[in-house]
Image (cartoon, coloured by chain):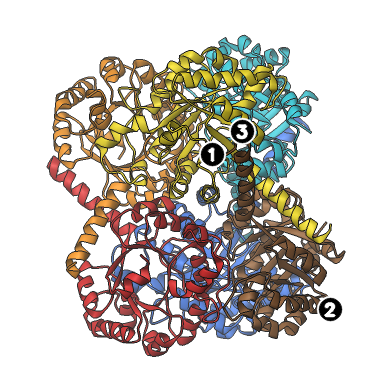
Chain colours: A blue, B red, C orange, D cyan, E brown, F yellow
């Protein structure tokens, strides 16, 4: 079932967040109980080659692949789709112009200006009918605009009204930095919570899907109540650190040291 | 003999189109009967590293290397030349501004603003004389602007008049999408053929080289008649699929199954 | 359906033969009409890492993966199975001692001495039950001993009688060199055909599966009549060369040059 | 402090067990609370290149690097040391001959036959004095012979008496398979525990260090009581699976689904 | 000691200049007597992945890592810092707008718009305190704007006045091309020396650090007198060529040929 | 001109010695003034994949490629030739049995047992005629047995008499360790010089080519007088260290610090 289908059914989905640009590591992550896997090219280590190679094991695990591109790298948004991703997250969409440029790269004409060439996506999705692919791609793929600055907040109505933008993705750490004018980084900053909630409310009112990065699991409950449905997080750094702490703890306990 | 020399002699050249970012695969492709090899970074899987590594086997096979960059990635146009490519194809040159930015990245001053540093190109081309390289590079390298939208068509005169643009490259699939306002993708769409021909006519009249992507070999004859001289296509996907179909067919025939 | 199941049903299978150590290239090959894909570490370029990474796309294409190890590298036979391969082909099995060492690496006790640790094979095959894996693996996996020298011919009865050897794989090029004492290399050497047939007859009589490398498709019909059922060949070198020759030919014909 | 120093002080050490052949993944693992990191080339995915590249981040985290080689790949034992590893674990040391061959590859003359050439180990360990390196290496490096079959058990005295063997490493899964003649794989098989303990007792009596693979943390306490001091385990597969299970569980609990 | 601390103490530093995108090669370079290592993504072969992997050995050698990004690739400036670099050099900063975009990518709010996510930098620098990292990063990291065109010279005051720009980096080859309007490339062009000196004078007057690329060692003395303190150069191409010439010469002399 | 041709003309050749498993680094080394390039898999970092990829730039620089395999890895000797190497150096050939196993892997029948499959070597050497390749390969390729222990010295006559062994390669560091029974490592140990000379004398008398590893250039003159003609050394570590020391020295001198 596609990401869009599940989100339109108002399901809540958990996405892993891969920052290790290695297809074998992604293969392991993709086999866990996540609903989908995001490959992070902004702060994570993914690159053009690792995205191309790592989408394969995500699809092999029968899950949608999402790619977060670096700031302003809309060339890579198109490429991620050509490689088989189902959704793209663009950071720092701070204006309507940013949103338009992002949408332009994500959607085929007449909605946008995406160029044709699904060389890898085609066989990976078992498709062969060009006409069908062209007719359905704009609907199948999802463009998430990251809302994480005051400028983005100011431009929110325009961003939500931009044709081709399918959802918003709230970056709470950057949002907290913006909110405090650089004084704090705190993904659960109480001060900004009302606004974080309002963003979801406005986005849903505009018919858009709402996604958010979750660092503290407790925030997950609150986010879902606010209307966020795609909860992303759980990088390899976090997974390995937690696994190691637990296992080492268990062994140390067993040996009494 | 350089790409430019052969094109100026009005020869018709066939370029392979590599989308597999692996130097060994490119080495095999480069040994076939193509006149040159294009490494595709837009819809193909090539990336900065694979381009750097894959130009080597193309030159070792004594053929010119061409690189198609992703949309708007003019930083990579310069780098492709620094790595030893002889030509660069830039997709979605939809305005004179696009053409200027592309030319700026391809040509040294005073024609453009390309930065100096042919670290890899120098030894790969067996050169050592900086002064000669500076004096001859703008002439030796070729900048192909892709014409594949209605906007590009509208701006064609200006694009052709942009100093530093050496040729146009028609993308027939995207052009068909543009022509039909998103309704069809068909690289041999009859409706647009007159315009496809006119682009070549106008480009040649402006003293520019004409290249085109060929999916259906039959289109090749028509394209040459229109004035196109660089015929690109034949991706690894296409080559392997055709080879496999033929060989498997031959074996199945031999064993009667 | 497993390789063994299909061979036991006396089906004739065609295996691609990958020599390019790159998972993306293998992914393309695996999507063609072959029944299975062999990754060649002897004369092809595959290595430990590429085998680990390339088995994934073969399984994703829902096909069995086979690995040919280098001469005497039985450590790699075990590893190939741990990575998810279903069969291993060992070259130059020239004595019963060779066959025993090979079988030892392929089968768990008490049949052999394979060491436990299917870290990658487990999740790749969607398995989680260790007891079942241990109980079924010796039956599920296939060990093919290459018969390609006079010594192997002399030792054939012993090789066929070695517990854990599931089949033979005839290497016709090396066999022709052996047959002519180094004078000729010819995979369809008429002189040796009776013996090539006799090897299959004896192997089948011993309840073993028969595989052979096919260079000339015409040989396929003959091989099947002899009793060979796994027909391997079709390297990327061959596929790309054939595809390129055909496509370039078609284009040249279309343009009349 | 070196591995040997800590083991000679009878400390109990926990080693991570890396099976993902990627230096960035190893870097993350090496930063966790483990005492050392083992790179597994037998059942894990490590290869010559990944070992060379992954020892660097382990040393950068100021921890000893250990390499488990594939069965019989003593060429790689020497190379692991040349790359900067401090210890090597050799699987399936089933005879005195195996132990001798392993020791030969691990120790410089006159103790063994290791060849000179610490190109990478030298700078990585900040060394420059060849004479000192030669004089101290045999003492500094540790050769662990895996005891995991009945044959190994039968040959244990001879293996322990082999000059150059510094310790044993018990492989409990394979040992359980051997113990049950292929009927079971169970790293905590009660039946074999007395023998597992006896191996440690005999090894320590012979002045050798004792290591063991730990799957179930509870076994750790028992192993330490038996005399095992190097407890290895915690692969990336295990760490990521445990981390994912915990984090997903926490999120699902928070959102009430 | 940080790069900034040393530069503020008016020390003169020599940076190696890596153009080979391979972490092992960078590891060797980083062990030599340089004060820091620059990874070049503009004319050198470094890419996103090689930068991520190569910063590790530079830090392991206890030296600051610097990254030169391709023209206009400010997304990569942020990423280089997230991967653990201490400074970034941006080529072709030809206007105040360029300088502002560069600074925006280098500094957290309120100074710039850098996004939060130091996933790799954190553990690599042994940090764990987010608040401290946020509070100190803008000060700790260095943004070097390359001055290498006439346009840059014209805009110099504005560039120097741009908040977040910490220094300038003079590119003498491109500057000579600009100075001669494309007629010459000569990093020690006498004609431009007065201006090269004036750039340093003006930059230092504005409280900025001055860096320059050195091809001819003799230029180093002159540059230091002008006020340049970070002297970069010494690519692998140069190092290997010089080493080879010397060693081959010594051998040829020894054998008398 | 082939390595054999030049050695048979009694020319003295200098081989670079690559230990960095990266084709781009090898490309730079191959462009220097060496007569040939050896890729070291024993103490250097080369592996199966890097050898396959790095032979290409050596051949592109129009030089013979040599591969040193790890101890006992004769499977890799055959593969190195299949990848396009012209010579293989095998370390630790300590007995006639070792020499025979090595020769077996290097030569086609009837001289040895090398298996057929020059997939990469063929196109890389521009060959297409199988019969010619088979007929000429045993003569064209060179097998160098390393003489570096007392056992090897004792077995020297037998090694030299082994059909298929084309030359010896003296490893002076290991030889000094053997000579001093582990007390010293010194490639120019005066004590052993008479024997080092005698090895060459005996080898030449048997019609074999003589190669030696050179660390100290002064040793080169002496070695040539002894009869050694292939002088190998000059690793990237050595080249970069020497280049860096010289360049940094020149800069420090220029700036007076």
In this rendering, does residue C133 appear at all? no
Q: Check disc 2: other Cα within 10 Å, few if <14, some if 14-19, many if 20+.
A: few
Task: Between label 1 and label 3, give the one nearer the viewer.
Answer: 3
Numbered circle sitting on residue F220:
3
Numbered circle sitting on residue C131:
none
Q: Chain of mark 1?
A: F
Residue at 70%, 72% (x, y): give it: E170
* Callout 1 touching callout 3 (CB < 8 Å): no
The spot of residue E127 in percent (x, y) is 77, 55
The residue that disc 2 covers is E205
Question: Which one is in front, A191 or C49?
Answer: C49
Quadrant where the C terminus of chain F sits is bottom right
Label 1: which secondary element: strand
* Alpha-carbon span between mark 1 and mark 3: 12 Å
Residue at 50%, 64% (x, y): give it: A11
Residue at 60%, 35% (x, y): give it: E255
Residue at 24%, 85% (x, y): give it: B194
Label 3: which secondary element: helix
Question: Which one is in front, B222 or F6?
Answer: F6
Tell me whether marks 1 and 3 sit on the same chain: yes
Residue A119, by quadrant, is bottom left
Quadrant where the N terminus of chain F sits is top left
Q: Check disc 3: other Cα within 10 Å, few if <14, some if 14-19, many if 20+.
A: many
- Above-or-below relation of C208 to B193: above
- Above-or-below relation of F129 to F176: below
Residue F198, by quadrant, is top right
The residue that disc 1 covers is F15
The spot of residue C137 in percent (x, y) is 40, 30
Q: Chain of mark 3?
A: F
Label 2: which secondary element: helix
Q: Check disc 1: other Cα within 10 Å, few if <14, some if 14-19, many if 20+.
A: many
How many labels sit on residues?
3
């Amino acid at each position: 079932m596609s990401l869009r289908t599940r989100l339109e059914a108002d399901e809540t989905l958990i996405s892993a967040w891969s920052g290790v640009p290695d297809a074998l590591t992604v293969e392991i992550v993709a086999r866990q109980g996540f609903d989908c896997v995001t490959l992070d090219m902004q702060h994570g280590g993914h690159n053009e080659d690792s995205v191309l190679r790592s989408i394969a094991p995500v699809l092999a695990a029968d899950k949608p692949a999402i790619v977060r591109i670096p700031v302003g790298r809309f060339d890579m948004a198109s490429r991620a789709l050509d490689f088989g991703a189902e959704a793209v997250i663009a950071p720092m969409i701070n204006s309507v112009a940013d949103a338009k440029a992002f949408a332009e790269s994500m959607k085929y004409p007449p909605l946008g200006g995406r160029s044709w060439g699904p060389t890898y996506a085609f066989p990976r999705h078992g498709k062969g009918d060009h006409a069908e692919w062209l007719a359905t791609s704009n609907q199948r793929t999802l463009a998430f605009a990251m809302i994480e600055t005051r400028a983005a907040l100011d431009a929110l109505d325009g961003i939500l009204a931009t044709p081709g933008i399918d959802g918003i993705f709230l970056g709470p750490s950057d949002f907290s930095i913006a909110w405090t004018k650089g004084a704090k980084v705190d993904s659960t900053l109480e001060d900004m919570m009302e606004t974080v909630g309002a963003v979801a409310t406005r986005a849903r009112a505009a018919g858009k899907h709402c996604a958010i990065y979750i660092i503290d699991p407790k925030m997950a409950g609150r986010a879902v109540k606010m209307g966020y449905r795609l909860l992303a997080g759980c990088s390899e750094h976090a997974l390995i650190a937690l696994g190691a702490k637990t296992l080492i703890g268990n062994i140390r306990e067993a040996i009494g040291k």
